[in-house]
Image (cartoon, grey):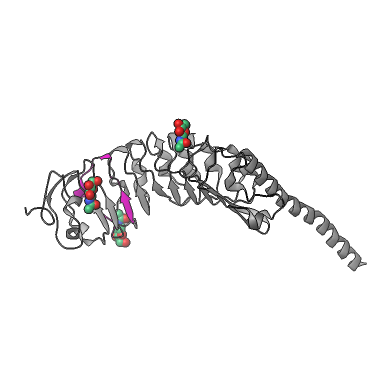
Amino acid sequence: MTLLLHLSIFFTILFISLPSSHSSSSNDKNALLQIKKALNNPPLLSSWNPQTNFCTTWTGVECTNGRVTALTISSGEISGQIPAQVGDLLELRTLDFSYLTHLTGNIPHTITKLKYLDLLRLKQTNLSGYIPDFISELKSVTFLDLSFNQFTGPIPGSLSQMPKLGALQINDNKLTGSIPNSFGSFVGTVPNLYLFNNKLSGKVPESLSKYDFNAVDLSGNSFIGDGSVFFGRNKTTIRVDLSRNMFEFDLSKVKFARSIVSLDLSHNKISGKFPRELTKLRLEHFNVSYNHLCGKIPSGGLLQTFEPSAFSHNLCLCGTPLKAC
Ligand SMILES: *[C@@H]1O[C@H](CO)[C@@H](O)[C@H](O)[C@H]1NC(C)=O
Ligand SMILES: *[C@@H]1O[C@H](CO)[C@@H](O)[C@H](O)[C@H]1NC(C)=O
Ligand SMILES: *[C@@H]1O[C@H](CO)[C@@H](O)[C@H](O)[C@H]1NC(C)=O
């Protein structure tokens, strides 16, 4: 009797679970076929043949346990927009549309259905318009790369609400406005900020000074004011590039973390003298050219290993590798 009951439960479970897992997998297949159709059956996706196993033979498709977990469409002749059906690949961890110069439009709202999405890379395409606020609904994303597109408008403040974001790469767009004030209160991890080559301006919020960024690149914008918020004796920051802006602060007042290996402050309005502690850094890249610095370049450490061009075009810097004082 108990055996019969167990058996009947077993078969009931089998009956309920088998068809549903099968249908999820075939939902993935349907979504992929619709994506192919929405992209006008491009040659790049010619391997997407309904007669074959999409997990093993379709270009750019990766599966785990029969479900699509990665979709990578890259470097091909693709015209049109990101199909809304990408949002039906509910188990996606990686969504990557990159190096597709004829991919236009914006990011479809349907991607907010991708609850497990870890990596979103839409790099070097022709996407345009504002970066949508709804990206912040993707709570599992650790890596967001929207670089080399035509995005305009402000950086959405809501991005600070993405608890696992480790890297924000929105460089090489046409973004305007400043760094949102909400970046003074990240809900989770503190992401590396790659904001370079945009049209960003204004001051960096003072509230960012409490964060220990690993890497920050704001180069090639029009930021003004104090850029020294990214420095601090006790931080573990590795790389800071503030070059080609209009930052204005006194270098002699900055306390540098010992961890910094790459520091580019060139082309700003930074004044003051060299702090001696710069000689204690294990610098691999260093450039302070085109600023308003003055005084002797301290000797010792690695500063003298850099070419004169790393120090040139300042107010009155002197000493090796420049002329003697
Ligand atoms: C990108 O889109 C713009 C219109 O938004 C168009 O003028 C341009 O030719 C496109 N670039 C490429 C490489 O397709
Ligand atoms: C930096 O760390 C040292 C040693 O742990 C501590 O004494 C000092 O107060 C810290 N400074 C700041 C600004 O947090
Ligand atoms: C420093 O930056 C200036 C300006 O961008 C550049 O011309 C120079 O080659 C750089 N030097 C080094 C050593 O990086």
Q: Does the stretch in magenta take in 100?
A: no
Q: How many marks?
A: 0
Q: Where is residue 158 in the image (x, y as percent from the top left)?
A: 49, 40
Q: Does the stretch in magenta take in 245?
A: yes
Which residue is at the front of the view, 301 or 88? 88
In the rendered structure, which segment of residues is drawn in magenta? 238-258
Q: Where is residue 60 in the image (x, y as percent from the top left)?
A: 58, 52
Residue at 85% x, 57% y is 12
Q: Is the magenta stretch mostly helix, strand or loop?
A: loop
Tell me which image quadrant ligand 2 sits in. Answer: bottom left
Which quadrant, please, contains the N terminus?
A: bottom right
Q: Position of residue 238 (x, y in %)?
A: 33, 56
Regarding residue 54, the answer to whether it shows in the image is yes
Q: Position of residue 110 (x, y in %)?
A: 61, 39
Describe residue 291's horizontal placement relative to residue 56 as left or right.
Answer: left
Regarding residue 255, the answer to whether it shows in the image is no
Q: Among all residues in the image, which is located at the extreme right?
A: 1
